[in-house]
Image: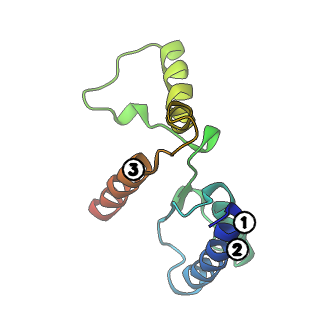
Amino acid sequence: MTRDDLFNVNAGIIRDIANEISKSCPKALVAIITNPVNTCVPIAAEILKKAGVYDPKRFIGGHSGVTILPIISQCQPAFKGDQATIEKLTVRIQEAGTEVVKAKAGAGSATLSMAYAGARFAGSLLRA
């Protein structure tokens, strides 16, 4: 699929799911990892806002750049770095996917890493 094809299919799916969330379970924790993530997340957010049920504390998504929010405070064992180190590490984490693509010379992506992160996150939501 081209990126446009992917958007056209997945945007409709995300739209329909967000509409159902707004009606059936507006307090749900929503984690979107559907590509193109940085387009699908805003679609769902706008639908939930329009329905009056958007809660940024219950809505998570993004997989590139500043949409990635590393939760370094949750590291085990606890991270002991200073603020400058945390800021450097945050940028490195946010750009890790791009780093993988560059290392593969454009012949692949960090899909397995995203899938693993999504599975871990979903497990955390279920345990919570």
In depth, the one of 37 and 106 nearer the eye is 106
- Relative to the observer, which residue lies in front, 120 or 86? 120
Q: Secondary structure at mark 3?
A: helix
| Residue contact at pointers 1 and 2, CB within 8 angstroms | yes
Q: Position of residue 36 (x, y in %)?
A: 63, 59
Q: Specify few, some or many for label 2: CA neighbours under 10 Å numbering under 14, 14-19, or 20 or more.
A: few
- Under mark 2, the amino acid is Asn
Q: How many marks?
A: 3
Distance CA(mark 1)–CA(mark 2) = 6 Å
Structural distance between the alpha carbons of marks 3 and 2: 23 Å
Q: Where 7 sits versus 24, above or below? A: above
Whichever of callouts 3 and 2 sits on the residue coming sooner in the sequence is: 2
Q: Earlier in the sequence, mark 1 or mark 3?
A: 1
Reading the image, the residue beneath label 3 is 112
Q: Nearer the viewer, residue 19 or 112?
A: 112
Q: Residue at x 25, y 27 (%)?
A: 77
Tell me: 3 left or right of 115. right
Instruction: Name the residue type under label 3.
Output: Leu
**Residue 127, image x, y percentages:** 27, 61
The residue that label 2 is drawn on is 8
Q: Is residue 80 above or below residue 46?
A: above
Q: Which mark is residue 4?
A: 1
